[in-house]
């Protein structure tokens, strides 16, 4: 069985493969730095996802990132192999503040013990109706977001269907009523044999009945069918982490978002 340090590195490598990046976002990449940037003020499009610089280089690199992120909010994603006390000190000097924290969690597919029940059925999104169900659950469960236009929805649907799709979407339905109750995605990283789980959510009135367990089980079944060895995610420490832990996932290292807002 692989240890926590191994899985920390795998989780970090998933973040270093932003195949999903839109056309209006760009990458600066070299051994000591990988940073995403965009003119759109969207934090995940203006984020440092890898830093391996020497301490004497850190101040200059933080300044470089701020130039790339001029006019937008800036984020550093500091996971175990990307953080140091000195880097955090310098980030503080440049106006960044430690924000949201998430814990890495991993489940080898052969170790998973499903908790399914007969109340739910899970379906992979393969048509527009399923895509809209996924979208509706996500917006209602998280209390934010907007419906995509039909054109945008069809474009995203293409990305999550077909034999070579690297984005998987799953919706869990009430078996009796047919109501969409839970949804979540998974990005596929074939070279890592790993699936990164994202946006798992259940409608408030359906929580505590096993819908999320059905969602996890369905995504792991898909991962296994694709030849992946494990799935994992970064779960927000004070909200989703306990839920993921209850599924039996292995806890790995912590990721902290260092954020810098717009200067006025």
Image (cartoon, grey):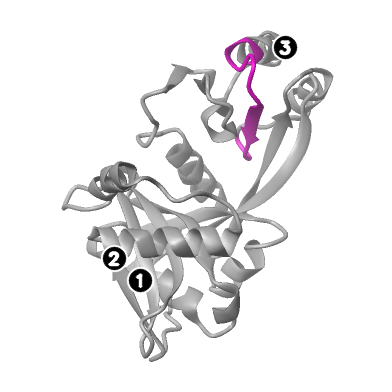
Say left or right for 55 vs 221: right
Which marked residue is nearer to the observer: mark 1 or mark 3? Answer: 1
Residue under label 3, please give it.
Answer: 59
User: Which residue is the site of mark 2?
Assistant: 124
- Identify the residue at the far left of this view: 163
Residue 135 magenta: no
Local crowd size for mark 2, using a 10 Å CA cut-off: few (<14), some (14–19), many (≥20): many
Vertical order, 41 against 63 (above or below): below
Q: Residue at x 77, y 26 (%)?
A: 96
Q: Which mark is residue 218?
A: 1
Apparent side of residue 85 relative to residue 37 in the rendered image (left or right): right
**Left or right of 7 on screen, residue 62:** right
Q: Are marks 1 and 2 in contact (CB under 8 Å)?
A: yes
Could you classify mark 3 by the number of other residues whose Cα lies within 10 Å: few (under 14), some (14-19), or many (20 or more)? some
Q: Secondary structure at mark 2?
A: strand
**Residue 251 lies in quadrant:** bottom right
Segment tinted magenta in the rendering: 66-81
In the rendered image, residue 260, in percent from the top left (x then y), is placed at 73, 27
Front residue of 78 and 117: 117
Q: Nearer the viewer, mark 3 or mark 2?
A: 2
């Amino acid at each position: 069985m692989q240890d926590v340090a191994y899985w920390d590195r795998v989780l970090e490598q998933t973040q270093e493969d932003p195949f999903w990046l839109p056309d209006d976002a760009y990458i600066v990449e070299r051994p000591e730095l990988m940073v995403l940037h965009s003119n759109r003020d969207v934090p995940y499009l203006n984020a440092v996802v890898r830093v391996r610089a020497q301490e004497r280089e850190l101040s200059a690199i933080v300044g470089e990132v701020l130039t790339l992120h001029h006019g937008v909010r800036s984020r550093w994603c500091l996971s175990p192999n990307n953080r140091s006390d000195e880097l955090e000190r310098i980030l503080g000097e440049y106006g960044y503040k430690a924000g949201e924290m998430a814990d890495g969690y991993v489940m080898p597919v052969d170790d998973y013990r499903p908790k399914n029940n007969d109340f739910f059925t899970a379906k992979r999104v393969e048509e527009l109706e399923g895509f809209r169900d996924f979208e509706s659950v996500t917006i209602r469960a998280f209390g934010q977001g907007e419906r995509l236009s039909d054109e945008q929805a069809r474009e995203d649907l293409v990305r999550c269907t077909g034999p070579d799709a690297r984005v998987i979407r799953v919706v869990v339905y009430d078996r009796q009523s047919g109501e969409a109750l839970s949804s979540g995605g998974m990005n596929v990283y074939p070279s890592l044999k790993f699936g990164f789980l994202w946006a798992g959510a259940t409608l408030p009135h359906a929580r505590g009945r096993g819908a999320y367990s059905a969602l996890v089980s369905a995504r792991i079944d898909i991962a296994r069918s694709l030849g992946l060895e494990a799935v994992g995610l970064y779960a927000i420490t004070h909200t989703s982490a306990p839920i993921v832990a209850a599924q039996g996932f292995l806890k790995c290292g912590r990721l902290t978002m260092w954020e810098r807002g717009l200067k006025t």
